[in-house]
Amino acid sequence: MEEMATRTLSQFRNEPTADFSLPENRRAMEEALAKVRFEFGREYLLRISGEWISTGDKLVSVNPSNTREVVGVHHKATPALANRAVESAYAAFSQWSRTPAEERVRLLLEASRILRARKMEFDAWLVYEAGKTWPEADADVSEAIDFCEYYAREMERLSGPQPVVQLPGEQDEMIYIPLGVGVVIPPWNFPLAILVGMSAATLVTGNTAILKPSSETPTIAAKFADVLLEAGFPESCFTLLTGSGAAVGDVLVEHPKTRFIAFTGSRDVGLRINELAAKHRPGQIWIKRVIAEMGGKDAIIVDGDADVDKAVDGVLASAFGYQGQKCSACSRAIVHRAVYDQFVEKLAAKARNIKVGPSDDPGNYMGPVISAGARKTILQYIETGKQEGRLVAGDGAAPESGYFILPTIIADVEPGARVFQEEIFGPVLAVTKARDFEHALEMANDSQYGLTGAVFSNDPEHLRQAKERFHVGNLYFNRKCTGAMVGAHPFGGFNMSGTDSKAGGPDYLLLFLQAKSVATRV
Ligand code: NAD
């Protein structure tokens, strides 16, 4: 890896999100939605290191707001093709890893420029394939751009001289080199941002990448693969392998030439990947690295002296933004008994006013959940919740042509309840009463997960205690617990929420590199 003599890039700044109250932005978005609609139903091939492949076995991606609409048709990979993908990525590694870091950084910034130029078009794909509302889609695309910009700067920093002690009579250096073939497995809920973040980190550090997108959002991934090619990334350095995770995932993870896996998704799949990757295979000459970011059961504590209206708004946005389908979503509100009744009443009233409907209509605050399977699971949890607490808002599916569910609140839930402990990943919030702040903190930590959390309080001593003892990777005070910003809020959780990789922070790229010490006697 070649050294960059000086740092040349400007300071990182977050990409602004579009203000859709402006008529010109509304118009641009409407045009983008129409343009994307025109491409509905197109067929997409697999790409293995530059080779286009059709398998005939197809995956159909539909619009969750209107399931009669086919967004894209994708060829599914087979286990044999997954093996071939790893072999090709392995063959391409020697050249890509020796491409100067400066050049890789340049290509990533070019990808970022293309994403920015087509921002509304990507927003529109997210509206139609992932069911995101306009602002949620735009935040996802902005975050994807942020990851490119941030990791480009991080690579510039890491490819420069590192601070090691100089011994007398020696020139001492430490350089970062790439690992090898990386398998990138993102979830569907940030179908652009997380895919781009993990792919950008893999490629800019000099690794070759196999991108295995979620079967729910393959079209967005195909569009991003186009961006990589257009930016000038050599076609040999990455593969787009669409297909069922279960069918090809194990092959990619188990292959002896796979060097690392960058995964974001559910706890059970993450644990399986970790287990399979740990087993040594014949011919394998390294211990595989697993970066696994997994689920959450995120709590917001509302203290006895909190501003209840602000807390209601924070909880509402965190619980029901993108239909509660964020790993950072608030699914437990733990409320001090002094304000409990008032809080529940105000929250339920506001939740009942939330408009649910097709995500391409900007009048709707909530769109659909991702799939029929997700809807079924969430509805079952609502039934369980009705046994475990008092239903105060929502109850079941909204009658529409897509996978809609009303924002649902179950009050008076005890900490042992399933809806308090299990990740539901939908618009369902459990509310629990706390005797005092200590009790609230205890209940917030009563979870196998530890991803995000928030506290609404005006008591500095309580906030100090939460900072010390609320065991989550991303903690927020007097604000919502979703919406982590690249650079400001490095993201990743504790315990069953994963390996705490801190995406969008200064530690992240190190997970994709290994350090080499070189000492020269002078
Ligand atoms: P999922 O675990 O079902 O799927 C994630 C990815 O793994 C998909 O690409 C899927 O195709 C693939 N996969 C499935 N089986 C596989 C196997 N056997 N081998 C390899 N790959 C396999 O998760 P999802 O439903 O896509 O996403 C929702 C989950 O992701 C939630 O649990 C959410 O909390 C979590 N999530 C976590 C973070 C975070 O940063 N911690 C961020 C977003 C989402």
Image (spheres, rainbow, N blue to C red):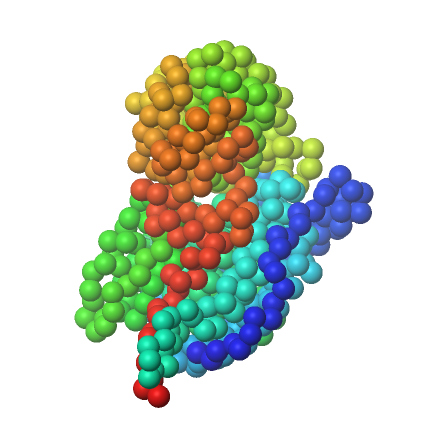
Q: Quadrant of residue 93?
A: bottom left
Residue 156 x/y as whole percent: 52, 69
* Residue positioned 58% across, 61% down in the render: 149
Quadrant of image for the C terminus: bottom left
In the image, 246 versus 519, the foreground residue is 519
* Residue positioned 26% across, 59% down in the render: 277
Query: Considering only vertical position in the picture, is 412 above or below 330?
Result: above
Q: How many marks?
A: 0
* Residue positioned 35% across, 60% down in the render: 261
Q: Quadrant of residue 84?
A: bottom left
Query: Considering only vertical position in the picture, is 414 above or below 357?
Result: above
Q: Quadrant of residue 421?
A: top left
Residue 305 appears in the picture as rendered: yes
In the image, 300 versus 330, the foreground residue is 300
Residue 208 x/y as whole percent: 42, 71
Q: Please identify the residue farthest to the front as the structure is shown.
A: 168
In the image, 177 versus 248, the foreground residue is 177
Residue 408 appears in the picture as rendered: no
* Residue positioned 63% across, 36% down in the render: 358
Horizontal arrangement in the rendering, residue 136 relative to residue 473 (left or right): right
Horizontal arrangement in the rendering, residue 280 relative to residue 162 (left or right): left
Query: Considering only vertical position in the picture, is 260 above or below 271?
Result: below
In the image, 430 versus 368, the foreground residue is 430
Quadrant of image for the N terminus: bottom left
Residue 298 x/y as whole percent: 42, 33
